[in-house]
Image (spheres, rainbow, N blue to C red):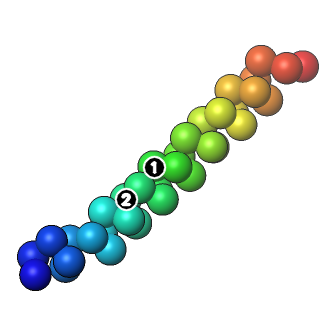
Amino acid sequence: MCQGHEFPIYKKDKERKAKIKVITLLAFFIREVP
């Protein structure tokens, strides 16, 4: 029951981290490539 309640929060956190990763990679690529 508790685990089922926590799962959507975990999924959102995972998606948020994935977005941060993509933004970081894009920023790095834009900075490195003139």
- In percent of the image, x 41 and y 55: which residue is there? 14
Q: Which mark is residue 32?
A: none
- In percent of the image, x 45 and y 49: which residue is there? 17
Measured as percent of width and height from the top left, residue 18 is found at: 52, 49
Measured as percent of width and height from the top left, residue 15 is found at: 48, 59
Q: Which mark is residue 17?
A: 1
In the figure, is residue 11 to the left or right of 26?
left
Measured as percent of width and height from the top left, residue 20 is found at: 53, 46
Amino acid beneath label 1: Lys
Amino acid beneath label 2: Asp
Answer with the quarter of the image where residue 31 lies.
top right
Nearest the camera: 19 or 30? 19
Nearest the camera: 7 or 26? 7
Location of residue 16 with respect to 4 vertically, above or below? above
Specify few, some or many for label 1: CA neighbours under 10 Å numbering under 14, 14-19, or 20 or more. Answer: few
Q: Contact, CB < 8 Å: mark 2 with mark 1? A: yes
Which residue corresponds to mark 2? Answer: 13
SS at badge 2 = helix
Location of residue 8 with respect to 30 vertically, above or below? below
Answer with the quarter of the image where residue 2 lies.
bottom left
Rendered-image quadrant of the C terminus: top right
Location of residue 25 with respect to 20 vertically, above or below? above
- In percent of the image, x 63 and y 43: which residue is there? 23
Nearest the camera: 4 or 31? 4
